[in-house]
Amino acid sequence: QVQLVESGGGLVQAGGSLRLSCAASGRAFSSYIMGWFRQAPGKEREFVAAIRWNGFHTYYADSNKGRFTISRDNAKNTVYLQMDSLKPEDTAVYYCAAQYGDNWFLRASQNAYVYWGQGTQVTVSS
């Protein structure tokens, strides 16, 4: 069992930056693929980024490449999402999620993630 708690959301102007954190409790954090997803009002939840258990492999949605950076600190049981050059269309509730094991080919598949946080709101003003 893993509990996930996101933090770091807020209101920022376009072009600004935010760093989201997701603290995990429970065991074997380093055994999980960690992902970030987001859901904008009136839209379906979508994949943002994922990181493999060892932190050496990352994957991003095309819309975020070059602007977002996912990282993790297994010693602190925490995964981060650094968001730069934010755009109004990045406005959404951001969720972190955990996928047990190393099925890296499922890194962008929501259904593969078993544990989810409660979400943190990110609002980007124009």
Image (tube, rainbow, N blue to C red):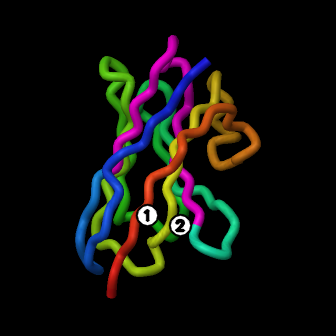
**Residue 108 place in picture, x, y as percent:** 64, 49
Identified at 57% across, 70% down, the residue is: 40
Which dot marks residue 65?
A: 1
Identified at 39% across, 36% down, the residue is: 79
Disc 1 on helix, strand or loop? loop
Magenta region, residue range? 20-39
Label 1, residues with CA under 10 Å away: few <14, some 14-19, many ≥20: few
Prevailing secondary structure of the magenta residues: strand
| Corner quadrant of residue 6 | top left
Q: Quadrant of the C terminus?
A: bottom left
Q: Is residue 3 left or right of residue 24?
A: right
Identified at 37% across, 49% down, the residue is: 81
Disc 2 on helix, strand or loop? loop
**Residue 93 place in picture, x, y as percent:** 51, 60
Total marks in image: 2
Contact (CB < 8 A) between labels 1 and 2?
A: yes
**Residue 36 place in picture, x, y as percent:** 51, 48
| Corner quadrant of residue 35 | top right
Mark 2 is on which residue type?
A: Asp
**Residue 73 place in picture, x, y as percent:** 32, 27
Which dot marks residue 62?
A: 2
Q: On screen, 109 above or below 2?
A: below
| Magenta residue check for 66 | no
In this view, the residue farthest toward the right is 111
